[in-house]
Amino acid sequence: MVLPKGFKHSAEFSRKQSIRNMGNRYGVGRIPVNKGKTGLWHHPKETCKKDSERVKQWHKDHPEFGFQKGHIGYWKGKTSPMKGRRRTEEQIRRNSEAQKKLYANGYISPMKGKHHSAEVKKIISIKHYRGGYKASKIRETSKRRLLGHELLNKPFPGSHGHHINRNQIVFIPKEMHEKYRHRLKNQESMENINEHVYDWMLGLPVRKPKEEAQQ
């Protein structure tokens, strides 16, 4: 018998059906034959290769939905639906409990006891800390989110972004940025560091700080 589309069984019928199936292979208390076993079902290597090639071809034919190397993906030029949203206290609590339970059950992080090499750290710094996701999150959640981000040069390894004013940023060596204390609200300190930044950009010898020159 073919049931009409949208037909639903009554609650009483569903209850009786559940009791009737308790002794069947899908009933309560039955243990699946493959429980705790792995590697029972797998595709031949040829089938996996064909599936992989078919998926790659689909991504080439539909680049707007792809995430292959060198492609930003579907969200290019669009606003993320999560922008401006924050997790609730309940979500944070549940995530924290889930993580604690995970490690309590014996989970070991794949990075435990391992360390990134200097080359890998350099790549991560360029990709994520200079214009990547982490940099955007830092800008979004910091007081500097009210400042502009007009870049006057490109970031380079070991560089810091310095606001020469409220809108324009120049990437300068980290040592220079940390050497001269400054803040936008203090005009004198900004003039002091900007003098050294302009000299560095023009390739001129960097002047000594005013404090050292007075001594």
Image: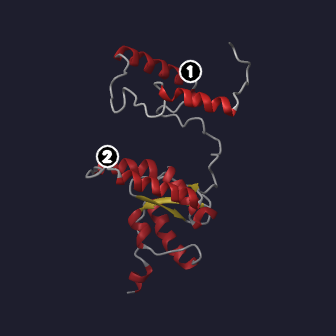
Report whether 170 appears left or right of 99.
Answer: right
Q: Amino acid at mark 2?
A: Pro
- Identity of the residue furthest to the left in this view: 113
* Mark 1 or mark 2, whichever is nearer to me: 2
Q: Secondary structure at mark 1?
A: helix
Residue 68 in view (yes/no): yes
Q: Position of residue 174 (x, y in %)?
A: 40, 63
Give the Cα separation between the discs numbered 1 and 2. 35 Å
- Identity of the residue furthest to the bottom in this view: 215
| Residue 45: mark in rendering | none
Quarter of the image where one finds residue 164: bottom right
Taking the spot 42% from the left edge, 31% from the top edge, the residue there is: 30
Q: Tell me which numbered mark, 1 or 2, is placed earlier along the sequence.
A: 1
Residue 131 in view (yes/no): no
Q: Amino acid at mark 1?
A: Asp
Report whether 118 appears left or right of 144.
Answer: left
Q: Secondary structure at mark 2?
A: loop
Identify whether 50 is placed above or below 25.
above
In the picture of the structure, the residue carrying the numbered disc 1 is: 61
In the picture of the structure, the residue carrying the numbered disc 2 is: 110
Q: Are marks 1 and 2 in contact (CB under 8 Å)?
A: no
Report whether 196 appears left or right of 5.
Answer: left
Identify whether 195 is placed above or below 114.
below
Q: Position of residue 49 (x, y in %)?
A: 39, 18
Q: Residues within 10 Å of mark 2 (few under 14, many from 20)?
A: few
Identify whether 139 is placed above or below 54.
below
Q: Position of residue 87 (x, y in %)?
A: 58, 56
Quarter of the image where the C terminus is located: bottom left
Taking the spot 58% from the left edge, 65% from the top edge, the residue there is: 144
Seen from the viewer's position, the closer of residues 96 and 152 is: 96
Seen from the viewer's position, the closer of residues 178 and 190 is: 178
